[in-house]
Amino acid sequence: MERIRHAILAGLIALALSYSTVLSPLDQVTWVAQSRVSAFEASGEIVYVGSSSDLTDPSFPERRQELARALDSLREAGAKRAYVDMTFNRSVDPGTDKALNAALRAFDGNAYLVRNLATDLNGELDLSQSVGSVSAGVPVVGSMRWKNYIGYTWNMPASVVYRDEQMPSLAASIADVPVLAGEYPINYGFERSTIPSHRFLDLLPSPDSPGALEELSKDIAGKVVVIGNLNRADTNAPNIPGHIDVPATMVDIYAAETLKAGYTRIVDEWLVILSILCALVLASIAGNRWLRNSVVALCLMTLLACVYITATLGIIMSAAGGLTMLGTYSLLRARANWKKNYRLVDADTGLPTFAALEADQDTAETVPAIIVAKIHRFEEVRRTLPSELHAEYLLRIVGRLKAAKKDASIYVGPGHLIAWTFPEKEPALIRDHLEGLRALFASPLLVGENQVDVGITFGVDLTASPNVTRRLAAAVDAAERTNETYEPIAIAEVASDEDLIWNISLQARIDAALSNGEIYLVFQPKVLIETGEMVGVEALVRWRDPVKGLIPPDHFIRQCENAGRMTQLTRHVLTEGCKAGIALAARGLNIPVAVNISATLVHERDILKMVREVLEETGFDPEKLTLEITETYRISNFDRANEILSDLRALGPKISMDDFGVGAASLEALQCLPFDELKIDRTFTSGIKDNPKAEAIVRNILQLGKDLRIIVVAEGIEDAATLTKLRDSGGTIAQGFGISRPIPLQEIMQFQSFKHEERLRDIV
Ligand code: C2E
Ligand code: MG
Ligand code: MG
């Protein structure tokens, strides 16, 4: 598309330039070149006779007499027509003028005098003509001579008009073609040497060479003779291609030869430009890369060939428009390519960019893995470094990465991302390699004089997709998901294209799913181990898609986050959770309802407003609401989170820490944040019955809860043995598939009516 746009633009520019006269010098070069290649032979029927002395000079009456004699000999020799291309604007003695007049008239209307139309001193057109004593009764033709700034005359008017008088032009009359209208181009392709030319003196009998005149007479019989001034020293003398300062008459003779040969056709500039445009457009839509890249050269060659061929056919063609168009197009393309290349190299470091990796289809398509490294606190560090060290900072990081893999090409991406390809597909091998790299970054980098600690994590793409952009995006996505302490290496899920497209549509459908009931809640009881009594429920979100069926919450919660819909989703769950709590209370089940809140939401005060509004709207008892903060390792600012959680708590709800034990930040979070409840992650609880270490951890967490005076809930209790072990370790509240799977609200209502013993019997 861009190529077509450039072709059209180049065409318009060329057209505009060729219609303004800017390209005229280039046009003239082409025409001169065309004239030189044509090498036509002139008709030979037009004979030029040049006089080196001014025959019109009134001080030399004898010259006029010589002219009269010469005309007589021409007539006798059988010349078809004679033209005297000079104006006798002063009379000499009446006898002389009369003799000349008689010689002209003796031709019976076939001898012509020429009137010259030229601009006078005042810039007005002025006709110079012979005095009546010479011209009376002699037919006249007109000549209008102009030459351009380099001395060439390219066009000739078909007839000459002065005031109201229209005269046949000298050239048209010589060629004896009917008077045309307008102008026609002069074709200078005739070899000058093929136009018979003689000196005026040769027309006069000479005692030195007695037979010469008879010889000449043979040449002249049946021909048209044009007598003019040789004008060698005349500064007004025009140029013709290949010859400078030729007699002015010669231009009219070339024009006459052009008319005789019918070489007055020209190829229009717009036609050339249009043809090139077609060629460029066709080449850009053709799939062939070679053709696309060589189209300018092909057009150029064709253009030059056309100039040559038309020259040999006597057709005048300008190449300037075409050349300008090709030049402009090439420049536009070069600029676009430069820009593209510019995108391919990072200006600061000179390293190739992600765009370069994307452009390198051949490697990127076949390489087993693409790795993206995320540099943590990159911007912070950059801010503390003087600006001249910014590039060095990145280069040092790249240098260290390269230490492990010398031949790797490293690509730099936006901000803090660095990518390279890796020749292995085995995740374990890649993890090993990346762990090794992380170890390399354990010691600080020296940037200038500064010691800089570098936190680095990695995202990996292993998909075999041929779409490099998508692969890179997947690796970037994985890198963005990483966490220095919790998950330093993330491997992108192997997703088919269909899944990716589906994911995108998923994001788009979240809003509708929230309102049409596709997204709904199930509830899982939390029970008192001692009695089996239900002491709370956890609301868990579900999405049943009409096509895909149940979508796992982990998956679509991530999608919600990516689509910026987390707040809407949370509000929906919170509202439905509170309504469920009211419904339970109405049935006499006055128990707390727990709702999961992603840690990412406790960075903003918006959550406070949301909880307050939902509590007001639903009228649910704030004391009966529990907010389970999930993924606490994602809390980056404990001070702020503490402030927000404390304010949330002040509204009434209890704050629970979900998945305790998973992620290095857990203990720190417990210490810094105001939790009322801890939920031990199922990674620990599931192991207690046969893993003494897990058992010790759980027992200690339970003790920790007692010491901190907070409730501890053990999640993921799948069987009776685990439950028993938990009770023996001091656990009081449990939640898990073994007690109940997450179930719809109606079933929760019935859950309580089962006997505790029956329930425990069920689960074994
Ligand atoms: P979670 O908050 O830790 O929820 C407990 C998860 O463990 C639930 O998975 C539950 O079905 C599962 N589970 C319960 N008992 C057992 C058991 O005995 N064995 C095993 N293997 N699993 C058990 P679910 O519903 O798939 O939810 C997964 C996670 O998604 C939740 O973990 C929570 O972090 C998140 N989530 C669910 N609903 C919401 C929500 O409404 N908002 C937010 N922000 N996150 C939610
Ligand atoms: Mg939870
Ligand atoms: Mg949990």
Image: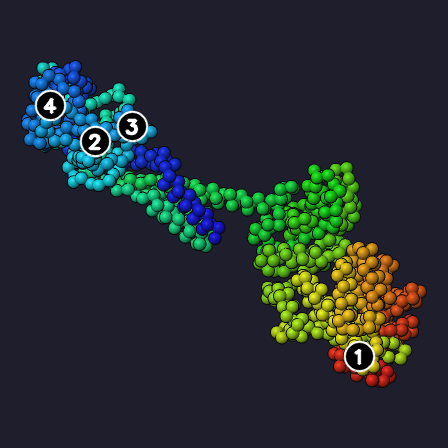
Q: Residue at x 16, y 39 (%)?
A: 177
> Ligand 2 is in which quadrant of the figure?
bottom right
Q: CA distance from mark 2 to mark 1?
A: 114 Å
Q: Residue at x 65, y 58 (%)?
A: 474
Mark sitting earlier along the chain (4/1): 4
Residue, disc 4? 133
Near mark 3 (Cα within 10 A), the count class, few <14, some 14-19 or many ≥20, is few
Near mark 1 (Cα within 10 A), the count class, few <14, some 14-19 or many ≥20, is some
* Labels in figure, total: 4
Q: Would you identify the image quadrant in which residue 133 lies?
A: top left
Mark sitting earlier along the chain (3/1): 3
Q: Which mark is residue 592?
A: none
Q: CA distance from mark 3 to mark 2?
A: 17 Å
Q: Is residue 147 left or right of residue 298?
A: left
Q: CA distance from mark 4 to mark 1?
A: 133 Å
Q: Which mark is residue 584?
A: 1
Which amino acid is tagged 3? Answer: Gly
